[in-house]
Image (spheres, grey):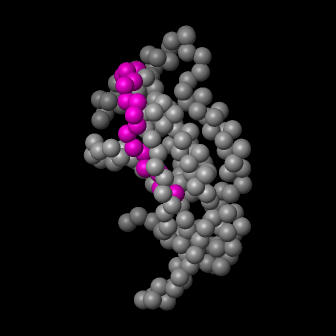
Amino acid sequence: MKNFIGILFCFMAFTACKQDIKESPTESFEKDTDSIIEELNIEEVQIEIEPSEKTIKELKEELTAKGFQTFDYVDAKTQDTILMQQYFMAFLKSGPIRTQNEEEAALLQEAHLAHLGRMHEEGYADLIGPFGDDGSIRGVAVYTVPTLKMADSLANLDPMVQAGRLVIEIHPWWTKKGGSLR
């Protein structure tokens, strides 16, 4: 893996020196992403709330006002009220166009990682990563946005998807608000 990263870095440094490239794939996708985010008013729905800071009722009201789907239930064993929130799980699957040469594939990978990094940094997606096998489902990203349309729009901005190297399959997914991995 270290060798691959080193080779990728050297390759990126070499290709960055070319004079004929006017705009990198990363710059291009960032402009596209910005326009989609503005169009969908996604920034208005972003919420950064620690569940312990508000009551379940307050949190549910705030999420509902932002357009998120929620429901709550009382755990029969603990009698705790559990707030469930809808997220969108995007499966990144092998696409029909996987014939890019090594240079094109490396540039697409760079832009793909930048896209996913931006989605995470700006709070649109969490739990992002590749699968450990060589199956047709290459990775997953869980989008924290109120609608399928928003999740689909953001996922399809991925340069790998736009190039046809990956395709997206999105499903609504419910989990406990504020839950974490162990």
Q: Is residue 6 magenta?
A: no
In the rendered structure, the answer to whether residue 5 lies left or right of residue 26 reads left
Q: Which residues are magenta?
A: 88-103
Q: In the picture, residue 104 is in which quadrant?
A: top left
Q: Which residue is at 50% across, 14% downward? A: 17
Q: Which residue is at 53% across, 54% downward? A: 143
For the residue pair 94 and 2, the one nearer the viewer reads as 94
Q: Position of residue 42 (x, y in %)?
A: 67, 51
- Report whether residue 123 is seen: no
78 over 30 or under it: above or below? below
Spot the residue most to the top. Answer: 19
In the rendered structure, the answer to whether residue 84 lies left or right of residue 127 reads right
Q: Is residue 90 magenta?
A: yes
Q: Which residue is at 67% across, 69% downward? A: 64
- Report whether residue 161 is seen: yes
Q: Which residue is at 42% across, 89% downward? A: 77
Tell me the quadrant of the picture where the N terminus can be found: top left
Q: Position of residue 45 (x, y in %)?
A: 68, 57
